[in-house]
Structures are given as structure tokens and as C-alpha cells.
Image (cartoon, rainbow, N blue to C red):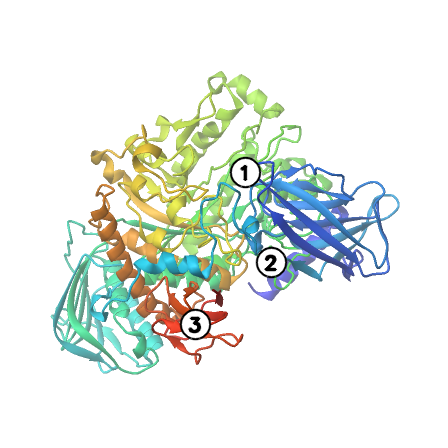
Amino acid sequence: MKKYVYSFALLLVVQFLSSCSKINEKTLTGKSQIQVTWKLVTNFTDRGDAFDAYFSLNNDGETALTDKNWALFFNMAPRPIIAPKTPQAARVVHINGDWYKLMPEKGFSLAPGEFTQIWYAGTEGVIKESDAPLGLYIVYYDKDGKEERIEQIVDYTIEPFTERQQILRGRADSLLMPTAANRYKANLSRSLVATTELLKIIPSPVRLTSGNGTLTLDGSQKIHYGTGLNKEANFLSKRLKDITTATYKVGAAAPGVAAPNAVGISLAIDSVSVNGITKEAYRLSVTPQGVSIVGSDAAGVFYGIQSLLALIPYESYGKAKCTLNSLNVEDAPRFHTRGLHVDVSRNFQTKETILRTLDLMARYKLNHFLVYTTEDEGWRLEIDGLPELTEVGGQRQHTSGLDAPALHPAYGSGPLAYEPGRHGSGYYTNADFVEILKYAAERHIRVIPELNFPGHALAAIKAMEARYQRLMKEGKEEAANEYRLVDPQDKSKYLSAQGYKNNVVSVARESTYRFYEKVVDEMAKMYQQAGLKMDVIHAGGDEVPEGAWTASPMAAKLLKENPAIKDPKNLQAYFFGKLVERMKKRGLTVHGWEEVALLKTDGGKYEPNPAFAGGGVVPYIWNNLFDYRDLGNRLANAGYPVILCNVSNFYLDMSYNNDPKVPGLYWAGFVDTYDNWYFAPYNMFSTTLETNMGRPLDVDQDFKGMERLRPDVRKNIIGVEAQLWSETVKGRPMLESYMLPKLIGFSESAWAKERTWEEMPSTDERKKRVTQEWNIFANTLATRELPRLARFNGGYNYHIPLPGAMIKNDTLKANTELPGLSIRYTTNGTEPTANSPLYTKPVPIKGTVRLKAFDKAGRSSRTTLATK
């Protein structure tokens, strides 16, 4: 994001919205002298699924806090607040979404030098330090109750989570404590394998056979390309230069040069069929004479290039020469749709971060990028003719109430817009998005924008209300209503899954559809500028809260005119049907979350909607837990082409484990690299590992009576997608550590051929095969993939798991989740470094030991402690 974009947008917002109690220089007075400490006390309460916590406030300033002159605002994961058992001096109040405030009760007083503790309780266990209240600031009020000034809390301490009742989600949580000893026991099934057993290419190709001899690449080889492959050839030349420092000349191939075993490196398109797949297929041959890559199309050639690059060992990075063993590869993808979804709305990611992510996708042969351009918490794409979308919807800061045409703080973004180190504000200009589209296209990645309606729409609603007010002040009533998204008389009461009370658009307004068409048309123009055609829109359509439209006069009129709709809960399906018609006229296929293919029954359950089956609507199935474990099977059986996004396996924002210092969500359990790798698309039940409380699922009992996928509709599983929602993701380092190495495991599920264990019954033989194959994959990650990622594109920030360790009989034993990582330890209280003693076998030892896992690139895990 260019600096002028931030300053220009902020200037417009301050000028236009100063009357809406937005922050300005007069109200923001600096850093507060109030010191705040927050502590989670316990998840083991006598009120079932609940937690107890408290705020400690220490007044180190000169102003007394009274029962009328202050409120402390903050964000935390949205959870209903429970009334305290005993009266407190102040109470926690939910405002909207994840925005809360601590308000004084009558009689409150905190004079300078005094201290107080305020307890509160909420539903569901809290087990991560990233769950703690964030973005704290105090608003002071004058004697009339009007906002007088705002101070940010800078002296804020989150007490560490150390006790069992803080780390487990409640008494029903059956997971083990994240101790070094428990990790050691969990890692015992892992072991080092011989180098010859490591995977040569990830994701695994269909067939790979070794040849005789070696080839040394040193820049003397010229890259010859066939018709239409100049971009691929230049891409290969640049990547080889980046990796090995050698320069490779590029030129069009002469007749007969682009053939197997040709001298140099040849790229060509020809008839290639691998296991009957002729799209994105390729053959790669490495001989002592040179390299040949023949693809069924340009994408196939590109993936052959990625496989060639994957053969370059870490030891050759930064050196002018690299030696490759001769081999032959025949390969094609299992699924044509291999997607990654990145939410840039909850917390913004820069254009540069997105480009780096596209490079990762290309490296692991993923080809669909779903970018979440709008959400309740932010609109992230400049749209010509609707400047408020980014000037208002693209930034968050303190507002005085829910009716203000502006976005309030979320996910710790604080009271200011565009504050350094915060990630609540920002957007992509037209030029940014066109650059992203071109960059993706060069890597054979299709970018799919998501415009989520009718729920999850607060940013759009607020922006269009700001537009409405501006034009009404100018006397332009018709223009003001052109893109308005709400029924101003709607008194419906609801609470969305993320705690919002006002995030659903009116489906009874023509202006809502006109707005959607306007945005889509402007998006299509950006695709044209990039030399591409926009042919898919993702309409979102998820999590419309119960109660929406129930007290809307406009909705009531629509229902009266269309008695077949019957009930407000059916208005979502009505809206989607109208949207599909309009998008089809623009030549767009409509994708959406699973709700777009469902109808809600009178009992509140979802059933497949036959209206769109086989009609160009593609649902993305995320819910394979709770009440809808067979939903993907049911929709595929009903005739829908589906993309599987299973939360139990592919949600990258779910934390790796229950270590309180490893950030992430866990409402659907924990998802690590193994879960991404361990997936059977035609036998999903067998790879749904755990419920929210960590109890292993029983395929026979937990899925009893549920639909299995019929063999004749396997073709309806058209792909898989990994999801990275960004509620807890703050900036590039966090985004990359959430993705890596999980995304590598996902690529194996998305590309590699069906694995022999996928449809085996749950027997010891199946478990044995899974354990053996995962062990090889884990060894390959540690030994080959992670070190290379430390050098690729200047280095990625990947997650390295803590080592396991235990001391028994004064002997230290240690191991790793990813064999091939080295373990270093100290016994003198200092932090382990790359020069500390190397653990290779059990060591006689006494007292406390500190350990870290290291890879060949010198990257390390955090420190873990092992004690007797």
C-alpha cells in the first residue's frame, strides 16, 4: 500500500465524518497513565462451558476515574458475557462483533495511586494468549456524557497461561497438556528415514523413475521454448537465477530441439495423458544431456518447471552449479481446482504479501486463489464511482455508536485508522489489483474475488450509508438511494455468528442488487485491464443470522407480494436465486459457501436446495463437523459440483495445537500439517479426526445413518481448498507461519494421486500405512522443504514445532515431530543456540533442560523446558 493512499483516505474520512464522533486531533490526547493487567483465571467453572477472568486497573495518572467519566474499549473473540456471581465495580458490555467495553457501575471510584480488580465471566473456554483483550483504549466523558478525549493503553500485561484450568477448554477437554513430555510420547511413532526414502518432489507425482547418470546445471544450458511458452521460459530462467545465481539464456526452439533428451533445457506442448488426465499434465525428463519438459498445455509445462525446481537441493541454493540425478516424471493433478482462500478483510495484508503467497501457491501447484475482498470488518478493493467503499469501509477507528456511518475497531485495531503496527485499515487500489491478477495469471492461478452478501456485509453497509448521507446533504435523493443497502425502518433483532447486530443487507431493495452489479462490473473491468476475463464470482452467502428481515417493512412487503417465499428465513434463497440470474447474464459462474445450495426447513435444519443443482452454482463445503458431517456427500449426491474445504483438515487459521503461546482459533479443534496431508475426499469420515473437545471420532458410530458418497458421483468432487481466515493473523510473519508447513501438506491432498490407505477400512494395516507414509513426508519437510523455504523469495516465516523431551532416571530423551530437525539443548539456564550441544542420543542429566529444534537453515522453534 502506497503512503499517499493512507494519507488521502484518512484526510477524506476526517473531513467528511468529523460530525460522527470520529477521532480527531482534539479528542486523541495520547497514552494513558492507566495500567491494565488481564488474567484468565479458569475454564473449569461451575457454570459449564464458561470462563472466569479479570481486569486489574492501576491509576498511575493524575485524573480520578469515577462512575461517569470513563469507559475502557477493547476487542476480544466474541463470546456472550455472563453476569458475575458477586457485584463488581464495573461490567463488561458487548457492543458489536468483537467490540466490547468495560463500564463503571454506580459508585465506582479509582483515585490516582489506587488499584482495583474487576472480574467477569463469558461462555466457552479461553485457552490462547491471542484470545486476550486487544487494542485497549479509554474514552473520557464530560459532565454531559459526551466524549471528551481518548487515550490508548500502552502499559498492558497479559498474564501467562500456565495452569491446567487455563490451557484446557473445560473439564470435558480430553486433550493432553502441551508439555515436553507429552510431546515426546506423541512423537514416538516418528523416526529418521534414509535419504533415499525422502520424497524428491512435493506434491508427489503420479510416476517417478530414476535413471542413470547426473546432470550439472551451471548456466551453460540454454532454455529452448516452443510456441506460446516464452513466459514460462522466462519464469524458469528467473527462478534458476534466484536460486543458483547462474544466468540461463532463453530462446525460441528450432524445429526438433524441444524433444526428450535434448541438449539444454527444452519446453514444449504436445499430447500428454497421465492416468487419463490431459489437462495440466506433463512429462519431465532429466538426463546427462539436458532437461525436457513436455506439457499437455502451458499450465502443464509450468508445473513441470516447478517439479524441476523442486529437485534442486538446499545445499545448491546460492551457488552457481547444482547437480541433479537423472529421472523421468509423468504427472497430472488429481483435482483441477486446488485452491487457497485468504481473508484480507478481518486483518489487512499488503499487496507484497499477496504476491509472495501466490509464489507459494505456484511452488506447490495450487491454481485457484479466493481473495476475500470484503467482510464486516473491512472493504479492501477500490471501486470506481463508489469512493466510500474504501474511504469508509477500508478503515477502522473509534466511533461513538453503532449508527455512525463508519467501522468501529475490530481484532485489536485500536482507536486510530492507519496506525503503524495495526492491521485494521488498508485496501488495494485498482492498479494493485490489476498487478495481482497479472502476477497470478503468469503462475497459472485464477483469482476469484468474493463479494459476500447478504450477511457479513457491515463494511459495505456503512460505506453506502455514508454515501447516502453525503448525497442527501447535497439534495440528491435519487442518487443517494441508488446503492443504499438497508431498509431504514428495519427493527429486526439478530446476532450473527461473529456477534454482529447490523450486518445483513436488505434483499427487498432493488438498490442492493444494483450495488452488487456495479461492483462486479467494476471488477470485470480490472480483469480486462489485466488482459483476462472474469468468469467466476464467489458470492459468499454464509452465516445469515436467524431473525434477519423479521421486522423489516420492505421485507414484509416483498413476502406479501411473493407468498411462495412463506417465511423470512427463505429470503436468503430468494436473494441468491435473483443474484444467480443477474450474474449469468454477465457470463459469470457463481460460487459460494455451502449455504447457497441449502434451504432451511421449518425445524431450522438445512437441506439441499434442488433449484441450483447442476446449474452452474458451486458450493464450497466447510462444515464437516457438528450437525452436518455428511453435508459434502449430500450435496454431491444431489448433483452439485462441490469444492471441499473441510474445517477439520483445511482451516489454516485453526491453531496447530493447544499450546497457549501458539496463536490461532480452535472452535473446530486443532489443525496441523498432518491433518492437511491426511485427507480422503471420497471417504471423508475416515479422516475427520476430532471434535471440538478432542475426542477421536468413531467412523461407525459418529457417522451412523449419514450419507456416504455414491461411487457414480465422484466426479462432482471437483476440488479442494484451504482456508486462511484472519481474525488472529496480524501481518506477514503470522500469515506465513499459519500457512507453512500446513500448505505443503494440503498440496499433497490436492494434487497427488489417490493414496492406497484412503478407502481402506479402519484397521491396523491402514494405520500402519498412514504412519509410514506420513513419517516419510514429515522427514522430507524437515530435511528438504523447510530449509529451502528459508531461502526462497528472501525467506518465509514457517512454523517449527517444539521438540518433545522427558527426563527419567536422570536421563534426557528428546525427539521431534518432524524427524530431520536437529535438537540443541542447554543446562545452565541460557537459551539454546545453533552452537549449543547437539542431542543425538539419551544423555545423563540432572535438573532443568532447555531445548530447541533447528533446521539446516538455522531457523529454530521456541524454547521448551524438560524437568524431572
Q: Distance between the residues labelled 2 and 3?
A: 25 Å
Residue located 29% across and 34% down the image: 700
Residue located 33% across and 59% down the image: 188
Q: What residue type is labelled 3?
A: Arg
Q: How far apart are marks 1 and 3 (CA)?
A: 38 Å
Which of the marked residues, 2 or 1, is nearer the chain's N terminus? 2
Which of the marked residues, 1 or 3, is nearer the chain's N terminus? 1
Mark 3 and mark 2 in contact (Cβ < 8 Å)? Answer: no
Q: Which quarter of the rendered picture does the N terminus lie within?
A: bottom right
Please state which of residues 67 and 412 is positioned toward the viewer in this rendering.
67
Residue 647 lies, in percent from the top left, at 41, 44
Please state which of residues 480 and 708 is positioned toward the viewer in this rendering.
708
For mark 2, does the 10 Å Cα neighbourhood hold few (<14), some (14 to 19), or many (20 or more) residues? some
The residue to which callout 2 is attached is 160
Residue 236 against residue 523 in the figure, above or below? below
Instruction: Name the image quarter holding residue 472.
Output: top right
Q: What residue type is labelled 1?
A: Ala
